[in-house]
Image: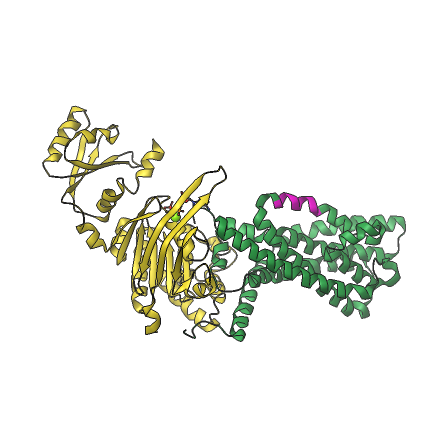
């Protein structure tokens, strides 16, 4: 056991993946990624849509070959010895539904355990424990076809742990789950990884707070590159001396280009809530008095400021600082 | 290395055996839980059977011909299952984001396919039993009981190689997706004819019959008819040849299925086609 704990859970060196798409387009989904994850760690990948998070997970879970480079999981080469890797890992992809509508929750969990050589007795015990923790208990004998999407996702999540893996890959595990369910799942993951020394979690998420709360280290990834990798605390400390502000604007404010002309504004990104239509402007400024200048420019443009708050540094500010835009900024592009 | 993971032959076999049964159980559970198929999957074939039986009676054909129709009807259920469920299984599992759940497991890919095949056979048997029962009760077809065990033996062999063919098809389907789907629709009807579901293959002439015989169900049906009804079956091949040929086909199909599966997985991993885009 101690011997195996010494081998890193994940070691990726110079990992790249290129996709050739139908229309002769070449997509560099991953570019020269180096990543070492020691045993016992919970590591988070944080990045916007298309950053390459799922691509990295697919390579590490033996579903995709890298174009260049090498990846070792649990000490085994994912390309050369996928079988040894598969014994030791499991994968939960948040979006998808797992299993068959005709089977009950319990049957689904048992089904997938059988593919790992888990004995019936062990499967029984594990399924009960997992259903209890995820709140699926009362639904144990309900068919999947009669479950809500959130419940199905919990089944999928529980399935990922039925094989008692050493290393678990969670691709957006709480995507679309309600607050309470997400909290239960985060609590489970952080407890699970601490239960045994060789256990390791790699997760991707869109939720900054999730990465902050759950992960020992966070990798910020964009356009297939890891831009930063450190503990959430160190990442936040690494921010240059600057302040972040959040402004809620009224009416239809112009795009953020005007901020380029305000000295002292470092980054700006604007986000329109698709539901409410409210516009949030996130600014980082070199000095607090810059915000006064911002307000007067806004006034000059006849943009109403509904609300103004100063923000403590969050992973979000780190993200904006490194990537130059917000994690949700794609929404803005999509809406424009 | 730790002994937590099966590495010796016995435990690897045990793990794969459990996986085959687990995968098969999905279909079996479905067959017994969801009974709505009873109507669609049995009433229509019985009606088709009835038409043929009445035509044969009108022509004054011997009663054994009516038995051929019933046997053919029961076998069509298997061919449909292979063509529609078995062959397209991987394709649909991928579309539903499910395929990756199987592919990340440490069992042999052949076990997953074998499980699917076994499940399909059991599920389809529930249909073919209904069809045969309907034939026996409605049309009073003759059934020489003493020859049933031999016929069942041949039937088992036929199913084995038929589902072997289905295992190849599922890799092919996976690779070609929707195009393969359209091809399958083209194949469905001609195979009904060629394989002699409703009348003896030898009526078609030797060349066509030989080609049709590559689909094991043709040979199997030919053999079963001969075993049960002797001369009247107008056999294509001497009945003694059929079991060895089916065995050879089974071995060949399993080998090809394994090759196709390995190729499919390798290519899929290289091209990024094993999973849907987002998941
Ligand atoms: N099979 C594929 N064929 C072609 N391009 C692909 C394929 N899979 C992913 N891509 C592309 O590679 C890039 C990275 O995709 P990936 O799914 O890894 O992003 P992601 O970080 O997981 O994004 P999201 O947050 O949306 O899940 C994207 O531009 C995507 O369109
Ligand atoms: Mg993704």
Q: Main secondary structure of the magenta part?
A: helix
How far across and how far down the image is residue A106, in percent?
Answer: 46, 63
Magenta stretch bounds: B180-188
How far across and how far down the image is residue A95, in percent?
Answer: 41, 50
Q: Is residue A1 above or below residue B44?
A: below
- Horizontal side of residue B64 vs B72, given as left or right: right
Residue drawn 72% across the image and 51% down it: B45
Q: Is residue B92 above or below residue A119?
A: above
Give the number of marks: 0
Residue drawn 26% across the image and 59% down it: A216
Colour that chain A carries in the picture: yellow
Q: Which image quadrant shows ligand 1?
A: top left
Colour that chain B carries in the picture: green
Residue B131 shows in the view: yes
Which of the two residues, A318 or A21, is positioned nearer the viewer here?
A: A21
State which quadrant residue B226 falls in: bottom right
How far across and how far down the image is residue B276, in percent?
Answer: 47, 48
Residue B240 falls within the magenta-colored stretch: no
Which of the two residues, A284 or A229, is positioned nearer the viewer here?
A: A229
State which quadrant residue B243 falls in: bottom right
Which of the two residues, B171 or A179, is positioned nearer the viewer here?
A: B171
Q: Quadrant of the N terminus of chain B?
A: bottom left
């Amino acid at each position: 056991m101690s011997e195996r704990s010494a081998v890193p859970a994940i070691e990726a060196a110079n990992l790249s993946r290129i996709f050739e798409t139908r229309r002769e387009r070449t997509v560099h989904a991953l570019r020269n990624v180096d990543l070492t994850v020691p045993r016992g760690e919970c590591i988070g990948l944080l990045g916007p849509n298309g950053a390459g998070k799922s691509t990295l997970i697919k390579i590490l879970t033996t579903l995709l070959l890298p174009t260049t480079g090498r990846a070792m999981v649990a000490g085994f080469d994912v390309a050369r010895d996928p079988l040894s890797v598969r014994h030791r890992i499991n994968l939960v992809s948040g979006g998808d539904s797992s299993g068959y509508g005709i089977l009950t929750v319990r049957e689904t969990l048992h089904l997938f355990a059988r593919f790992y050589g888990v004995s019936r007795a062990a499967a029984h015990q594990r399924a009960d424990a997992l259903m209890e923790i995820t709140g699926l208990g009362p639904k144990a004998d309900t068919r999947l076809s009669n479950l809500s999407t959130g419940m199905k996702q919990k089944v999928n999540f529980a399935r990922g742990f039925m094989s008692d893996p050493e290393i678990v890959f969670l691709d957006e595990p709480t995507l679309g789950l309600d607050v309470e369910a997400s909290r239960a799942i985060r609590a489970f993951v952080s407890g699970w990884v601490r239960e045994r020394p060789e256990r390791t979690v790699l997760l991707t998420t869109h939720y900054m707070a999730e990465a902050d709360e759950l992960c020992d280290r966070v990798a910020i990834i964009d356009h297939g590159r890891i831009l930063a990798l450190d503990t959430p605390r160190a990442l936040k400390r690494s921010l240059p001396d600057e302040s972040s502000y959040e402004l809620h604007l009224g009416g239809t404010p112009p795009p953020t280009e005007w901020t380029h002309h305000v000295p002292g504004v470092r980054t700006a990104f604007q986000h329109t809530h698709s539901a409410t239509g409210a516009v949030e402007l996130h600014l980082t400024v070199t000095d607090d008095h810059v915000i006064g200048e911002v307000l007067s420019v806004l006034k000059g443009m006849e943009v109403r400021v509904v609300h103004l708050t100063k923000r403590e540094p969050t992973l979000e500010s780190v993200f904006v600082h490194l990537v130059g835009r917000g994690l949700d900024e794609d929404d803005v592009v999509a809406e424009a | 290395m730790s002994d937590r993971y099966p590495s010796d032959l016995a435990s690897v076999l045990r793990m794969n055996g459990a996986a085959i049964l687990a995968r098969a159980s999905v279909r079996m559970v479905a067959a017994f839980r969801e009974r709505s198929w009873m109507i669609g999957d049995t009433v229509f074939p019985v009606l088709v059977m009835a038409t043929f039986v009445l035509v044969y009676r009108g022509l004054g054909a011997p009663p054994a011909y009516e038995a051929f129709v019933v046997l053919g009807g029961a076998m069509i259920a298997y061919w449909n299952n292979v063509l529609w469920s078995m062959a397209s299984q991987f394709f649909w599992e991928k579309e539903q984001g499910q395929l990756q759940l199987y592919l990340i497991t440490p069992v042999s890919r052949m076990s997953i396919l074998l499980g699917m095949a076994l499940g399909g056979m059991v599920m389809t048997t529930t249909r073919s039993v209904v069809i045969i029962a309907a034939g026996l009760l409605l049309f009073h077809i003759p059934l020489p009981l003493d020859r049933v065990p031999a016929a069942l033996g041949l039937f088992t062999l036929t199913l084995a190689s038929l589902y072997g063919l289905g295992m190849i098809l599922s890799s092919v389907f996976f690779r070609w997706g929707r195009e393969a789907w359209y091809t399958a629709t083209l194949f469905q009807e001609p195979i009904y004819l060629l394989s002699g579901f409703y009348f003896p293959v030898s009526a078609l002439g030797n060349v066509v019959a030989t080609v049709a015989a590559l689909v094991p169900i043709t040979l199997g049906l030919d053999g079963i008819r001969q075993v049960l009804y002797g001369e009247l079956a107008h056999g294509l091949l001497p009945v003694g040849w059929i079991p060895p040929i089916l065995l050879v086909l089974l071995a060949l199909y399993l080998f090809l299925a394994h090759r196709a599966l390995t190729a499919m997985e390798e290519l899929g991993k290289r091209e990024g086609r094993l999973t849907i885009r987002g998941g």
